């Protein structure tokens, strides 16, 4: 049977197209590191996330010198936590879950992109070699404020990064016949024990206390000052560890005027 030249040509061209289509689909599915959402990350009860070992403790956790884990919950219309900070040259594994409806997680300009499904833990690993700000968004329609579901990953220089949290506890006022206690609470989220000096300033006095905090622990130091020696008036206080600062004011009052501590 004689096949017309044009018919052979069209046949060849359409065969080429079909092969081309299959090729692009295959590449799109597996060629650029795309994985389907699966339950490899495990499952979780979306109604009891606060009891979960991971999602009861959201945020950034250091695993070793260069590896960090981020536990994050998507709940309309935000991510918890929304803005995170990590150091450059780090590998970050994200553990994500949703507590209400299906959300998405897409770091702009990267191939980090996944659905976040209630009841499932999505695990994603990305490397951050350069400093800068990476925005991420929810790219799965999830409700009226879907467009507001976004956050930032700040990649900062190694020397500017630490995982220490400081909180200061100082009363607003103290009578001269009591003791003024300035309390500093330091949480160490680094993977190793830290030894630091806490500097406390009150009025023109500077007091220093050294402290050791084990990994994943919180430790407190207190310094006491005799308010009578300061005299009545308002005093600025400041508690400092590394580049973390807490400050405020305390009023030293006559015993009668205070009527006890506020
Ligand atoms: Cu969450 Cu859209």
Image (spheres, grey):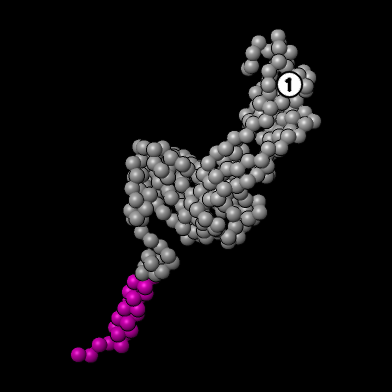
The magenta segment: 1-24
Up/down of 172 relative to 104, above or below: above
Residue 54 placement, left or right of 127: left
Q: Is residue 119 above or below residue 3?
A: above
Give the image location of residue 30, x and y in percent.
38, 67
Q: Position of residue 141 (x, y in %)?
A: 41, 46
Q: Is residue 10 above or below residue 35?
A: below
Front-most of residues 83 and 225: 225
Q: Which residue is mark 1?
A: 227
Query: Relative to the observer, which residue lies in front, 79 or 18?
Result: 79
Q: Is residue 225 visible?
A: yes
Residue found at x 34% / y 76%: 19
Q: Residue furthest bottom?
A: 2
**Residue 146 in sight from this viewpoint:** no
Kindly state the secondary structure of the residue where label 1 is placed: helix
Magenta-drawn stretch, dominant element (helix, strand or loop): helix
């Amino acid at each position: 049977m004689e096949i017309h030249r044009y018919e052979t040509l069209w046949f060849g061209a359409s065969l080429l197209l079909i092969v081309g289509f299959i090729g692009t689909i295959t590449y799109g599915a597996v060629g650029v590191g795309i994985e389907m959402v699966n339950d490899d990350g495990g499952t979780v009860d979306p109604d009891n996330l606060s009891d979960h070992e991971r999602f009861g403790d959201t945020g950034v956790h250091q695993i070793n010198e260069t590896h960090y884990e981020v536990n994050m919950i998507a709940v309309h219309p935000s991510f918890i936590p929304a803005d995170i900070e990590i150091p450059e040259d780090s590998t970050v594994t994200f553990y994500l879950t949703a507590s209400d409806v299906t959300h998405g997680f897409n770091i702009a300009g990267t191939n980090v992109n996944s659905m976040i499904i209630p009841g499932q833990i999505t695990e994603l690993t990305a490397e951050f070699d350069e400093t800068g700000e990476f925005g991420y968004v929810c790219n799965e329609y999830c409700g009226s404020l879907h467009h507001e579901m976004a956050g930032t990953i700040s990649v900062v220089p190694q020397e500017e990064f630490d995982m220490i949290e400081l909180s200061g506890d100082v009363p607003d006022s103290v009578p001269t016949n009591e003791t003024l206690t300035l309390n500093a609470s330091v949480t160490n989220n680094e993977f190793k024990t830290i030894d630091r000096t806490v500097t406390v300033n009150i009025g023109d006095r500077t007091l220093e206390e050294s402290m050791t905090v084990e990994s994943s622990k919180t430790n407190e130091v207190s310094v006491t000052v005799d308010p009578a020696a300061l005299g009545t008036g308002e005093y600025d206080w400041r508690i400092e560890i590394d580049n973390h600062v807490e400050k405020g004011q305390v009023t030293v009052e006559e015993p009668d005027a205070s009527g006890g501590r506020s």
